[in-house]
Image (cartoon, rainbow, N blue to C red):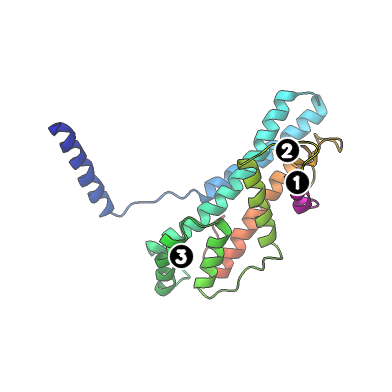
Amino acid sequence: MTSQAEDVQARIQARSSMSATPTVRHSFTKQHFRAAELFATSAEGLECEIRTANQKDTIGKSRHRAFVVGAIVSAVMGLEACINEIYIDACGKSKKLAGLDEAAMALLALWWPEIERRPILLKYEHALLLLGKPQLPRGANPYQDVDNLIHLRNVLTHYKPERDDSLDEADALESRLTGRFDLNPLSTRANRWFPHQCLGSGCAKWAVRTSAEFVQSFCASLAIAARV
């Protein structure tokens, strides 16, 4: 028992020592965006292979679907990692936020505990509001496409099967996304729009492009270095 207590005390002291020492924090923003790009490129390459070789390649099509979904999810992970890291950088008065004065960073740091668990886009909007910057118009891009991208990620993450005679979610998604990217060339119009026609490399590349453009616009609004 004494040994366990001593072990716990030692770990507490080690944490205290670490917190008093400046450490290099790892950033996941670029890693998530690079992963999204890799998945999108891989999906496009598989489409060419399967169309040339064998349209009935079910294993290849499963890999293709995984790459497309991976691109979508990674792009949204990049969006969230980016805004979280900006708030955290403000808490530490990081040089990565050169362009923001100490008062601006103090405001972001003050609100971080309140905003941490809020929706992704709200975190971005709140930062702009706090710093007196113009909001990104909700009815225009890049905001609108990012809103649609996050919605698509949510549908995939919290997927609920629908019957053929009741496709409310699928129809709503088609209405949101139609015309925003090229459809999956491995599918036909006889297939459901979602997921079959929707989830192709066109959608994956749109996810990468949309998230990157949004982050670039946001960073430009704050006059900080681009994070993508």
Report the side of 196 relative to 208 (left or right).
right
Q: Do tag 2 and tag 1 residues touch (Cβ < 8 Å)?
A: yes
Furthest residue in direction left, as rendered: 2
The question of residue 179 being in magenta is answered with yes
Residue hosting label 3: 97
Which numbered dot is residue 162? 2
Label 3 SS: helix
Q: What stretch is highlighted in magenta?
A: 168-181
Asked which quadrant contains residue 146, the reply is bottom right
Asked which quadrant contains residue 196, the reply is top right
Q: Residues within 10 Å of mark 1 (few under 14, many from 20)?
A: few
Judge by depth and name the residue closer to the eye, 226 or 196: 196
The question of residue 58 being in magenta is answered with no
Q: Say which of marks 1 and 3 sits in front.
A: 1
Q: Main secondary structure of the magenta part?
A: helix
Kind of residue sitting beneath label 3: Leu
Image quadrant where one finds the C terminus: bottom right
Residue hosting label 1: 168
Which numbered dot is residue 113? none
Place of residue 14 in the rendered image (x, y in percent of width and height, measured from the top left): 23, 45
Kind of residue sitting beneath label 2: Glu
Furthest residue in direction right, as rendered: 190
Place of residue 54 in the rendered image (x, y in percent of width and height, measured from the top left): 80, 24
